[in-house]
Image: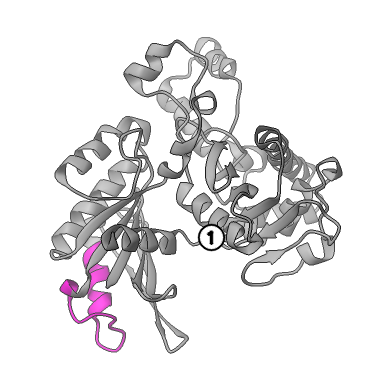
Amino acid sequence: MNIFVINSGSSSIKYQLFHSKSVDPVCSGLVERIGLGDSLIKHAVFINGEEKVTKLELDIPDHEAGMYEVEKLLVQPGIAVVHNPDDIHVVGHRIVHGGETLTQTTIITDEVKEKIKQLYPLAPLHNPGHIKGIEVAQSIFKKATQVAVFDTAFHQTMPEKAYRYAIPENFYKDYGIRVYGFHGISHKYVSGKAIEYLQKPDAKIITIHLGNGCSMAAVNAGKCIDTSMGLTPLDGLIMGTRSGNIDASVLLFLIEQQGYDASELTALLNKKSGMYGLTGYSDMRDITKMINEGSDAAALAYEMYAYRVRKFIGSYTAAMNGLDAIVFTAGVGENDYLVREMACRDMDFFGIELNVEENAQRKPGIREISTASSKVKVMVIPTNEELEIAQQCKVLLEE
């Protein structure tokens, strides 16, 4: 069974092709800057352990054009991984928001597409792109079963006390305003790997997904009981360009005293805040360079970023009444040793002791970066959302 995984964003398409009997991808790729005039495609094929990369610069006006370019690459002589599009048996789609009705991996029907569209107001930057990806995939891979895997699904095990907001109940019942949580595919994957590694099915784990978007989850015996993102991916940790937690009165002040409207606030909090708002850069590598050059603003931004992580570690340890392991994952979590060091600093009360030398090393795979005497294991586990999606598709279709 060939499973083609698509992660379709507002201006990009990430993809990987898997054979159902292997955890290693046959090919992977990224289509960037769709509709912006100077689009890029990076397509990698893995043959006998070697990577063969094709890069294209061209004008890709929309997602449909992007996927047709990907189709050409899949069958291109010399790097072909399938004979024709009908060799793709399953297409798995990452869907950011499934709300309260789409809570399990499911075969995509017209009814499912309509429910995803109904959630546009809750995920205006993501779900419309997912629908485009689904419709284009249906037109290209006509014989494939289309499957939706939802980022919010993993967090549906949260108790009501964790997902409700302290506002009148009708806002929840009438409009679905509650904590949904995101990055669930990643949190599910790395927490499952941690449970396997620890050989402890009832482990209490905090997963820390740090990329441009950042979130944390409290996972007790494989089930999420709390998470840092809320109604949207804006809440919680400080992120690349998003503010994370902020007093709602700040927004009221900007509306009443400075004349801001909803679109200006959306842009401010989602695209101009976070590490970008504090330093002028959203990439942690640029900010690390600023620190090395003596920037006080960059040093403060790192302190704030790590401090927010530490506060969530404390609250989630309390929520689970214990802690067996902390897992860092995603681009920043896997590669930025300074963030990990600062996030684990002065946490000895919780039994968290970091091996500073081991933490500073760059190594592949799952690894421990805590001391031998640490009561809580601190781990780095590379995330693999595409593999998790492929595996969920396989399980669904083999049931």
Q: Residue 234 location in percent, x, y?
A: 51, 34
Residue 213: tell me if it is visible. no
Residue drawn at 36 percent across, 43 percent down: 126
Left or right relative to 300: residue 109: left
Residue drawn at 46 percent across, 33 percent down: 267
Q: Nearer the viewer, residue 178 or 195?
A: 195
Q: Residue 137 location in percent, x, y?
A: 21, 59
Q: Is residue 39 above or below residue 274?
A: below
Residue 73: tell me if it is visible. yes
Q: Is residue 278 above or below residue 383?
A: above
Q: Is residue 44 above or below residue 261?
A: below
Q: Nearer the viewer, residue 396 or 99?
A: 396
Q: Amino acid at mark 1?
A: Thr
Which quadrant would the C terminus be assigned to in this image? bottom left
- The residue segment tinted magenta is 67-86
Q: Residue 397 location in percent, x, y?
A: 26, 61
Mark 1, secondary structure of its residue:
loop
Left or right relative to 339: residue 275: left
Residue drawn at 27 percent across, 76 percent down: 74
Report crowding for label 1: few under 14, some 14 to 19, many 20 or more residues within 10 A (C-alpha): many
Marker count (numbered): 1
Residue drawn at 29 percent across, 89 percent down: 78
Is-magenta flag for residue 77? yes
Q: Is residue 135 above or below residue 308?
A: below
The residue tagged 1 is: 383
Q: Quadrant of residue 362?
A: bottom right
Q: Residue 259 location in percent, x, y?
A: 48, 15
Which quadrant would the N terminus be assigned to in this image? bottom left
